[in-house]
Amino acid sequence: MPTNRIAYLIGHLAIGGAESQLVEMLRHLDRSRFEPSLILLAPDGIERVQGLINRSYYIKGSAKQNNLFRSIMRITKALKEIKPAILHALLPEPCILGFAAGKLCNVPILIGSRLSLVDCYRPNHSRSVIFADRLATRISTHMIGNSHAIADELVTLDNAPPAKISVIYMALIPLDSIPQSLLCLEAHLDGIPDMSFLGAWQTSLTISARWI
């Protein structure tokens, strides 16, 4: 029986880099040790993970000001049902909403993945959303970027400690090449001898890569 529950949070699962990456994560997850659940802000593409997850939730959420609080509360409700040891949010909006909900639920480990530079998305958002994006980085347990440029922005723009930032490229990588800083997260949670759930990052080379 799996000993640790992990909840993945993403906007949707329609075709895209982060979305395909998550599908591959779920395909490679060691289910003898981890029980995955999925929270989506929109239902698109849910058929891609049929048979790969134990539970899925569609919470119809967004970080827009008129929907922010309700979205966080819906994610909080889902997390209270899942009771995960780990919440892994992919992309900025899920990080903003998920980490706030995770803190309310006392989820022990909050991991975020950022897969683009801030110039690709922050200019389209209000100052309050940009502040919330930076705050999400700061309250996370660990942040992952797929390039050193993204990792540098997490440190210089969001004031995240370099020790909690890792770079994992969108490519096929062996599990033993995952950065030691991620493996050391085991100290946050008893009963997880390593972070092999990040074998999720052993993604297919057919996934579109964003090299910076």
Image: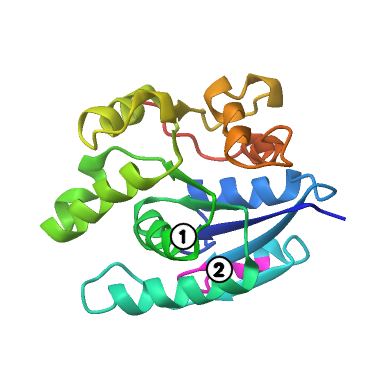
| Residue occupying image coordinates x 20% and y 41% | 119
Local crowd at mark 1 within 10 Å, few (<14), some, or many (≥20)? Answer: many
Task: Give the residue type that dot 1 points to.
Answer: Gly
Left or right of residue 94: residue 63: left
Q: Which residues are magenta?
A: 40-47
Task: Give the residue type that dot 2 points to.
Answer: Leu
Q: Check the picture and name the quadrant holding the C terminus.
A: top left
Q: Is residue 157 visible?
A: yes
Q: Is residue 204 visible?
A: no
Residue 75's tag is none
Q: Where in the figure is residue 7, as x and y percent of width and height?
A: 60, 58
Q: Where in the figure is residue 92, as x and y percent of width and height?
A: 35, 52
The one nearer the camera, 56 or 191, is 191
Left or right of residue 99: residue 132: left
Is residue 160 shown above or below 83? above
State yes or no: discs 2 and 1 in contact (Cβ < 8 Å).
Answer: yes
Q: Check the picture and name the quadrant holding the N terminus.
A: bottom right
- Residue at image mark 1: 102
- Residue at image mark 2: 79
As for residue 129 lying within the magenta part, the answer is: no
| Residue occupying image coordinates x 25% and y 46% | 134
Is residue 208 shown above or below 176? below
Is tag 2's residue or tag 1's residue first in the polypeptide sequence? 2
Q: Where in the figure is residue 89, as x and y percent of width and height?
A: 48, 53
Q: Where in the figure is residue 183, as x and y percent of width and height?
A: 61, 28
